[in-house]
Amino acid sequence: MPVKNVNNFSNKMKEAASSILPVMLLVLVVCFIAIPIPPDLMLSFIIGSVLLIIGMGLFTLGADMAMTPIGRYIGRKMTKTKNLWLILLLSFILGVMITISEPDLQVLAASVPHIDTGVLIITVAVGVGLFLTICMLRIIFGVQLRWLLLGFYALIFVLAWLSDADYLSIAFDSGGVTTGPMTVPFIMALGVGVAYVRSDMRAEEDSFGLVALCSIGPILAVLALGFLYSGGSQIAEDTVLKTYADTTAIGFGYLSALPKYMLEVFVALAPIVAFFLAFQIVALKLEKRVLQRILIGIVYTYVGLVLFLVGVNKGFSPLGTALGGELAIGWRRYLLIPLGMLMGWFIISAEPAVHVLNKQVEEISSGAISAKAMGLSLSIAIAAAGGLAMLRVLTGISILWFLVPGYIAALALSFFVPPIFTAIAFDSGGVASGPMTATFMLPLAVGAGNALGGNILTDAFGLVAMVAMMPLITIQVMGMVYVFKTDTEDKVVPAGAYDDLDVIELWEVV
């Protein structure tokens, strides 16, 4: 491995550890102080956490080396053809293929009991593919993001009012998990590649908002599925509590899971790799050095995704389910809300992509909104989302009582902030609803919901959607702060503020 790749790998491992270790330590503290957990399950959780860190590190390194460049190169090349129908067709195919390989979606699909895993993954992937074509049309023709969001979210809530309650939370969670570590870099790179051929000032601004629109596709697709699908017999086996007789049984459990996930990941990645290689032969013709780096990145992505899924499904998520079940017993149920808030705070604070987002907002606002202030506001928002999600588990309040006001507020704010803030806000839902939300917080809610005897489809699912919604409001509120500050600074400076020797440029005074 070259020195540059070694350094990148080290950085990705540090990022993965900073995301997972805070949650891991919080869980260990809770289990050692308040909640009794069998030793074999705890050891399995620790092993799963280690695999999760290594897997996420390799996976994100591979995504940077392979998926992001692939998206950028294909986006530029297909746009240069100036063949609109070809652009739309390729965008749909790419959207479907890249979504199928999204790890967060695979984790969610495995935990949904009433929809077959394959059916849910394909439905969500088709939704992303369709809306990626809409994204391309928006970039090419310069359509304002605000009006598309208003129209599509109005359609979503009409369908939500008519749909089966068992599909409602799953639909909104699907929109959150598809904007994950595989899909986001690829889609954003594809958008930048398409916007690259435009020379007007709004081209860069229009490259934002792709993730926002692509997260709408799965919501509409799953809501539509509820009207057509009769249901499956799948059992969410991956979150069922497993016990082990000894350490050998734990080791065998992990090793026996490897072939299954190696095959699943191969099937998930094979289409996008085959498409890229065909595109390379026919159109891209990248030089050998660039192609070699991308192929190495694909290998990293494959190995990382396998380790990620094994760690999640064999150790990480099962403990979340068991912990949620124990917390729902007796007086301990009152710990659910504060624990959900703590986890929300630590998850968003430790998420590396959030720090990138905060710096981005600081740069766009020319320092009017500091990265520190942005980080604090997001931490408060996601902590509140975690607490409200656990409140839903305890009370069974419909998710629409939270999502409808939340999205109305977010869409209303879009009229009072610069468009770039709206685009970044709606894109950032995927940043907030990262891997930890789907792999631990959701199983925690499912375990608690089962123990309380509630309907997990309506009470526990929807947690990812709650977490994904909060940045839409927070970032736009920060945008309003930016507008207020710039308006204040642009006011006329009083005449007394000038010295006798100052040179006053009269045409610059309003």
Image: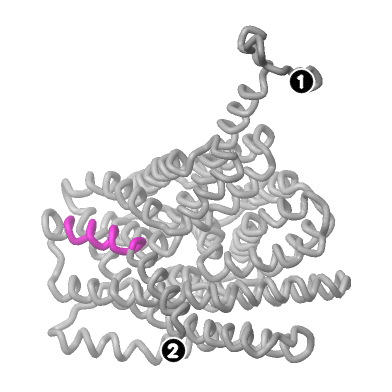
* Residue 167 seen in the figure: no
Residue range highlighted in magenta:
18-30
Of residues 428 and 16, the one nearer the viewer is 16
Considering only order in the chain, which callout, 1 or 2, is on the residue closer to the N terminus?
Answer: 2
Of residues 349 and 414, the one nearer the viewer is 349
Colour convention:
one colour
Q: Which residue is mark 1?
A: 505
Question: Residue 38 in the image: x percent, y percent?
Answer: 14, 70
- Of the 4 image quadrants, the one containing the N terminus is bottom left
Residue at 19% from the left image edge and 78% from the top image edge: 243
Residue at 78% from the left image edge and 75% from the top image edge: 77
- Of the 4 image quadrants, the one containing the C terminus is top right
Residue at 35% from the left image edge and 48% from the top image edge: 345
Q: How far, Cα to Cα, is label 2 from label 1?
A: 69 Å
27 in the magenta segment: yes
220 in the magenta segment: no
**Which amino acid is tagged 2?**
Met
Extreme top residue here?
Answer: 496
Which is in the foreground here, disc 2 or disc 1? 1
Question: Residue 41 in the image: x percent, y percent?
Answer: 19, 73
Residue at 55% from the left image edge and 65% from the top image edge: 178
Question: Residue 72 in the image: x percent, y percent?
Answer: 68, 71
Q: Which residue is mark 2?
A: 262
Q: Is residue 343 above or below residue 127?
A: above
Numbered tag placed on residue 443 in the rendering: none
Of residues 416 and 466, the one nearer the viewer is 416
Main SS of the magenta segment? helix
